[in-house]
Image (cartoon, rainbow, N blue to C red):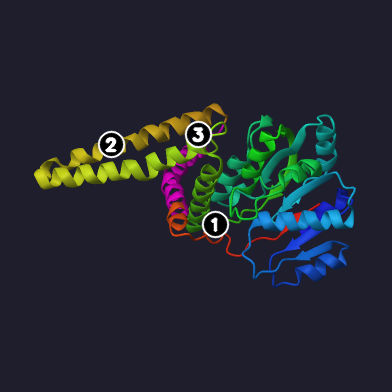
C-alpha cells in the first residue's frame, strides 16, 4: 500500500491493477478511494496487459486526462516528482515520456540490489527507452496503441521504439522519481532476472531488429558471443586437443582469457563513471557472469518460438507485483 499512498499524495486520480493477489489488496485500495481493476487471471498475465487495462480504466473515470504516471507496485513515487515531470513534458509538445532517477531502496542489503541501483542510473537527456516508472502523454500512447500485451518483458523499450518511429521523444531528467525494492538476496533470483532480460532482448530484436532501428541488435550479438559462442569454442578446442594429446588440452582453455579482458573493460568503464573500486569490481564480475543467463534467455525465446509456443512469465520474485497507474 506504500505505492498507493505515494501516488495519492500528488495524483488527481489513481488506478490500482491487481494481478491475482491473495492479501485483500483490492479491498484495501478501494478503502483508500482508489479505482481498482482486478485482472482476469485465466488470460495469460503480462505487465503490458495490466498497464493497458489500468490506462483504459483511468480514461473511463476521466476521459480528459492528458498525462499518466505508471509506477510498479514495488515502488514509491518520490515527493515532488510529478510536478517536476509535468513541467518538463509541458515544455516539449513532442515529448511522449519523461522519466527520472529510480533508486533501489536497500542497495546495501545485497550485491544484487546494488546491481539494480546501478542499472537504474541511465544517462540524463533524450533517450531511446524508459523503464516501468514514467510519466507519459496519453495522446502518444493512443497513437501507437499502447503497450503490446503479448510482450512478457521489456515492454517499455518495445513501445518506445514505436513512439520514436512516430516522431515522439523520450526524456530522462536529473530528478528523483521513485524508490524500488528489488528484494533480491539470492544468486538464483539474480540469475532468473538475467534470463528474463535475455528473453526481452531476443523478443525485442525479433520485433524491431531490422533497419532503421536495429533494436537490441548490439545486446543480442554480445550475449550470443560471450554466453554461447566463446564457451563452445573453448569446449571444442579443449576436447579436440585432449583427443590429440592430453598434455596440450590446456591450450584449448586460452580463449577463455577473453573473459578477463571483458572484465577489465567493464571495470574501467565503471570507474570512469565514479564507481568505488570494490563496487566496480563486483559489478564487472557479475556483468561477465550475466552473459550466460542472458544467452539462456535468448535461447529460450527462440526455442519456444520455433515450437510455436509463448514463453510464460519469468518472475524472479515469484509472484508478479501488481501495477498501478496514477
101 horizontally vs 233: left or right = right
Residue 254 lies within the magenta run: no
Measure the C-alpha gap from mark 2 to mark 1.
33 Å
Q: Nearer the viewer, residue 42 or 5?
A: 42
Q: Label 3, on which residue?
A: 277
Measure the C-alpha gap from mark 3 to mark 1.
22 Å
Magenta-tinted stretch: 275-301
Of badges 3 and 2, the one in the foreground is 2
Q: Label 2, on which residue?
A: 255
- Sequence order check, earlier mark of 3 and 2: 2
- Sequence order check, earlier mark of 2 and 1: 1
The image shows residue 71 at horizontal and vertical percentages of 73, 51
- Sequence order check, earlier mark of 3 and 1: 1
Q: Secondary structure at mark 1?
A: loop
Specify the quadrant that holds the N terminus. bottom right
Q: Label 1, on which residue?
A: 185
* Residue at the extreme top: 272
215 horizontally vs 95: left or right = left
Q: Secondary structure at mark 2?
A: helix
The image shows residue 215 at horizontal and vertical percentages of 55, 37
Amino acid at each position: 500500500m506504500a505505492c498507493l499512498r505515494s501516488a495519492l499524495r500528488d495524483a488527481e486520480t489513481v488506478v490500482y491493477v491487481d494481478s491475482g493477489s491473495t492479501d485483500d489488496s483490492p479491498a484495501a485500495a478501494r478503502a483508500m478511494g482508489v479505482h481498482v481493476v482486478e485482472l482476469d487471471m485465466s488470460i495469460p498475465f503480462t505487465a503490458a496487459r495490466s498497464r493497458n487495462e489500468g490506462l483504459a480504466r483511468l480514461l473511463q473515470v476521466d476521459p480528459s486526462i492528458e498525462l499518466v504516471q505508471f509506477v510498479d507496485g514495488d515502488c514509491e513515487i518520490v515527493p515532488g516528482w510529478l510536478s517536476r515531470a509535468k513541467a518538463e513534458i509541458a515544455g516539449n509538445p513532442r515529448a511522449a515520456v519523461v522519466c527520472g532517477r529510480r533508486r533501489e531502496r536497500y542497495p546495501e542489503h545485497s550485491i544484487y540490489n546494488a546491481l539494480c541501483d546501478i542499472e537504474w542510473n541511465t544517462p540524463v537527456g533524450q533517450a531511446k527507452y524508459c523503464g516501468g516508472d514514467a510519466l507519459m502523454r496519453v495522446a502518444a500512447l493512443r497513437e501507437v496503441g499502447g503497450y503490446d500485451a503479448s510482450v512478457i518483458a521489456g515492454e517499455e523499450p518495445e513501445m518506445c521504439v514505436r513512439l520514436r518511429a512516430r516522431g515522439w521523444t523520450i526524456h530522462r531528467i536529473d530528478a528523483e522519481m521513485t524508490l524500488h525494492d528489488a528484494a533480491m538476496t539470492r544468486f538464483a533470483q539474480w540469475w532468473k532476472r538475467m534470463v528474463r532480460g535475455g528473453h526481452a532482448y531476443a523478443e525485442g530484436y525479433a520485433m524491431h531488429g531490422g533497419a532503421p532501428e536495429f533494436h537490441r541488435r548490439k545486446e543480442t550479438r554480445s550475449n550470443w558471443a560471450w554466453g554461447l559462442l566463446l564457451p563452445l569454442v573453448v569446449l571444442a578446442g579443449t576436447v579436440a586437443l585432449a583427443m590429440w594429446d592430453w598434455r596440450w588440452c590446456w591450450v584449448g582453455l586460452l580463449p577463455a582469457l577473453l573473459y578477463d579482458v571483458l572484465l577489465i573493460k567493464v571495470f574501467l568503464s565503471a570507474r570512469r563513471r565514479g564507481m568505488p573500486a570494490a563496487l566496480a569490481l563486483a559489478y564487472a564480475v557479475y556483468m561477465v557472469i550475466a552473459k550466460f543467463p542472458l544467452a539462456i534467455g535468448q535461447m529460450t525465446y527462440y526455442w519456444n518460438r520455433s515450437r510455436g509456443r509463448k514463453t510464460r512469465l519469468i518472475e524472479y520474485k515469484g509472484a508478479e507485483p501488481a501495477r498501478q497507474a496514477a
